[in-house]
Amino acid sequence: MSVFDQFARSIDIAKLDEDQFVRLIETMDMLGKAGTGIELANLSTSTFVWIIEKASAAQLEALMAHDNLRTVVLSEIFSRMGKHLKQDAPDAVVHWRFIGGYDTGGYDRYQTVIEKGRCTSGIVQDRDPRATVTITPSDFLKVATGNASAPLLFIRGRVKVKGDIPFIASFPNHFDLSSP
């Protein structure tokens, strides 16, 4: 475990209020942009997942309400999905609509393409999706890191799916971003 991971895990996330939690992630992002080597991308995936796991719902909501950090953290999740795709994952295209965004209709939109054992994501939606998922970004963080159940959120009406519902229910199983 790197020194940065050890530092991050030494923080008692529960003692931070929402603003302090946002400032912690903002500081990590700022240090990364300054080229210090201390940045979200340099955290191990298990530590990144641990931070999401330890964060309260209110902390994650505050983080996803931040104009810049919302994009930074979602991009980080999508980047890690590409690095942690399981070899047996089927080819598929998924469109994401994150509630509370700035694009048309009040959504941030992303596309994930799994093809020939590779996973890429971005904001361009140029392919027909197997499914389109509408979800809050904080719920997406929890599901993507194994800290919430997509089927349970679907049953509770917190996830809406247009298209292949069984595939989306199993989608997190195609990645090894498991909880630490």
Image (cartoon, rainbow, N blue to C red):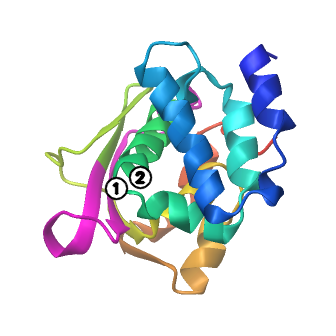
Residue contact between numbered discs 2 and 1, judged by CB atoms under 8 Å: yes
Q: Hey, which quadrant is residue 58 in on the image?
A: bottom right
Taking the image as drawn, is residue 18 in sight?
A: yes
- Looking at the image, which residue is at 81% across and 41% down? 11
- Looking at the image, which residue is at 47% across and 60% down? 64
Sort mark 1 into few (<14), some (14-19) or many (20+) by Cα contacts within 10 Å.
few
Sort mark 2 into few (<14), some (14-19) or many (20+) by Cα contacts within 10 Å.
many
Give the residue at the far bottom of this rendering: 156
What amino acid type is highlighted by mark number 2?
Arg
Nearer to me, 125 or 34: 34
Nearer to me, 142 or 83: 142
- Looking at the image, which residue is at 68% across and 51% down? 52
- Identify residue for label 1: 67
Nearer to me, 66 or 86: 66
Q: Residue 100 lies in magenta, yes or no? A: yes
Q: At which x and y percent is residue 73?
A: 47, 44
What amino acid type is highlighted by mark number 1?
Asp
Vertical comparison of 38 with 46: above or below: above
Q: Secondary structure at mark 2?
A: helix
Vertical comparison of 93 with 151: above or below: above
Q: CA distance from mark 2 to mark 1?
A: 6 Å
Taking the image as drawn, is residue 169 in sight?
A: no
The quadrant the C terminus occupies is top right
Q: At which x and y percent is residue 174?
A: 58, 42
Give the magenta-colored segment's residue range. Answer: 82-110
Vertical comparison of 59 with 82: above or below: below
Count up the numbered dots.
2
The numbered dot on residue 70 is 2
